[in-house]
């Protein structure tokens, strides 16, 4: 079937009746529930956009001839890579980059592991075939995905097999002729339950040893599989209108703890089973992390552009753009944006074909960007807060402006240099939702831990960085900076 529409996306969720819990209740219809209906509409808008901008968002399937999502594309050239990134950008623009797990993120992962599947064959040739087939299935059916990578945060000082309650983490219970039985808990599925299926994969950062083999699993199953439950955190969509909560009322993706209660996974959906070595190498050796990082950096360029737009609008609104310290803070965001764009440009234009014929971005550029952005994003948010100052607290609601008695008073009281009170508060409510609301706080925390603990990531980056050329350069410089003295008796 061709790429789905927004209506088809919502209809699938209605029929699936995924097992979702929030606020102590089981959700009957996720498309109508206050915690999910607005983000589901935003997701539906993404799928509709595929047809509104068909030339950018769709391409012809190599197997069926149907029109499928461009974000599933296996790029064969730099031009293909840029086309896919342009589709990613179109989706990110709809939310200002605030949907960190829009479907393109995992579409890139499925594509990479589907075409670069040799690694999975080390354990069983059928696992490689499964990965290949799943990519085609997801692409041809426009499957929306959530995923889970990490084990419960019980005692980080111990390996999973050393935990006091070792069985709390998702683990293998049984293998039989039809498939495997798994049981336990996994964290932390963004968009859990509002997608078609879930990918269970190993951590991109935390490595495992052989004793953790029972926990070393990778598979994909429908979200309505018996025994599978999504335990959602409190929603940061508080049911307010879009004027009062312009971001959280539309793009609150949600995060869920995932419970597997003796869940059956058929063999044709298994990619890794009891093999920590393969799990540890999955993301890097399939180049999945490269294509995922490409999507993330493209999304973060849009997000930084959005932040810059908010800051520049605040400057104009209250006439602070002539102050030196204000301009300097604007420059910080501009520099961040241009650095991210440079990383993206280098990644694409230094891309090369891998051994599977996939045009793969320059990972050095993307790895630097994905390590740097979590460190700088909190500063970008801080700049918005500093420049917004008390204006981020003086934000009456839209209803206040429509009140016959106080509306005119407020419109005058909170006016800006170039905006009336109603317009200025609308802008400042956007800045508040971006920074100080529960949604804004989650955005900052989310970006900081996007790929894992930034310190752990930094250690990995340091260990893998090619340091020898720089050390050799210094050694050569010193060697040529004078004759070595002769010490008597040495």
Image (cartoon, grey):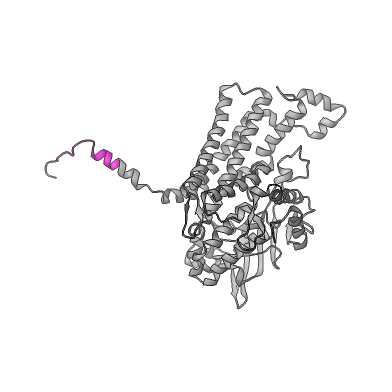
> Which image quadrant: the N terminus?
bottom right
- In the displayed structure, 67 sits above or below 166; it is above
- In the displayed structure, 255 sits above or below 211; it is above
| Residue at the extreme right | 404
**Residue 260 horizontal side relative to residue 479, left or right:** right
Q: Can you tell which quarter of the image residue 136 is in?
A: bottom right
Q: Residue at point 57% right, 61% down?
A: 201
Q: Is residue 166 visible?
A: no
> Which image quadrant: the C terminus?
top left
Residue 374 rendering spot, x and y as whole percentages: 55, 43
Residue 67 rendering spot, x and y as whole percentages: 67, 56
Q: Residue at point 23% right, 38% down?
A: 480
Q: Is residue 187 magenta?
A: no
Residue 398 rendering spot, x and y as whole percentages: 80, 34
Residue 234 rendering spot, x and y as whole percentages: 71, 50
| Residue at the extreme bottom | 177
User: Mostly what secondary structure, the magenta segment?
Assistant: loop
Residues shaded magenta: 474-488
């Amino acid at each position: 079937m061709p790429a789905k529409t927004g209506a088809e996306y919502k209809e699938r969720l209605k029929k699936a009746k995924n097992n979702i819990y929030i606020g102590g209740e089981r959700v009957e219809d996720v498309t109508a529930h206050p915690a999910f209906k607005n983000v589901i509409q935003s997701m539906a808008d993404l799928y509709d956009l595929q047809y509104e901008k068909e030339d950018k968002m769709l391409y012809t399937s190599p197997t069926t001839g149907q029109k499928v999502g461009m974000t599933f594309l296996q790029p064969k050239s730099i031009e293909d890579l840029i086309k896919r990134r342009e589709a990613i950008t179109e989706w990110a623009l709809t939310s200002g980059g605030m949907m960190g797990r829009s479907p393109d993120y995992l579409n890139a992962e499925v594509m990479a592991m589907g075409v670069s599947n040799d690694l999975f064959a080390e354990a069983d040739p059928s696992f490689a075939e499964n990965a290949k087939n799943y990519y085609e299935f997801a692409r041809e059916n426009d499957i929306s995905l959530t995923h889970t990578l990490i084990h419960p945060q019980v005692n980080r000082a111990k390996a999973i097999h050393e935990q006091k309650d070792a069985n709390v983490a998702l683990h293998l219970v049984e293998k039989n002729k039809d498939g495997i039985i798994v049981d336990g808990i996994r964290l932390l599925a963004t968009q859990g339950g509002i997608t078609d299926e879930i990918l269970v994969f190993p951590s991109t950062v935390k490595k495992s040893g052989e004793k953790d083999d029972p926990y070393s699993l990778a598979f994909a199953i429908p979200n309505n599989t018996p025994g599978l439950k999504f335990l959602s955190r409190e929603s940061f969509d508080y049911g307010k209108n879009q004027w009062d909560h312009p971001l959280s009322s539309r793009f609150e993706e949600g995060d869920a703890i995932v419970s597997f209660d003796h869940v059956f996974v058929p063999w044709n959906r298994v990619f890794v089973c009891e093999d920590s070595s393969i799990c540890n190498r999955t993301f890097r050796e399939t180049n999945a992390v490269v294509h995922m990082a490409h999507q993330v950096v493209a999304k973060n360029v849009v997000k930084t552009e959005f932040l810059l737009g908010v800051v520049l609008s605040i400057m104009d609104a209250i006439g602070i753009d002539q102050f030196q310290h204000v301009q300097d803070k604007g420059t910080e965001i501009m520099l961040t944006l241009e650095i991210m764009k440079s990383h993206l440009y280098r990644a694409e234009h230094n891309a090369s074909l891998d051994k599977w014929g996939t045009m793969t971005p320059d990972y050095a550029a993307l790895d630097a960007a994905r390590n740097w952005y979590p460190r700088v994003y909190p500063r970008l948010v801080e700049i918005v807060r500093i420049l917004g100052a008390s204006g981020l607290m003086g934000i009456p609601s839209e209803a206040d402006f429509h009140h016959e008695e106080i509306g005119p008073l407020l419109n005058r009281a909170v006016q800006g240099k170039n905006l009336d009170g109603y317009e200025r508060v609308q802008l400042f409510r956007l800045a508040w939702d971006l920074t100080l609301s529960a949604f804004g706080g989650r955005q900052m925390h989310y970006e900081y831990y996007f790929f894992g603990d930034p310190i752990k990531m930094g250690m990995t980056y340091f260990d893998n960085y090619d340091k020898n050329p720089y050390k050799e350069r210094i050694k050569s410089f010193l060697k040529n900076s004078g004759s070595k003295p002769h010490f008597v008796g040495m």
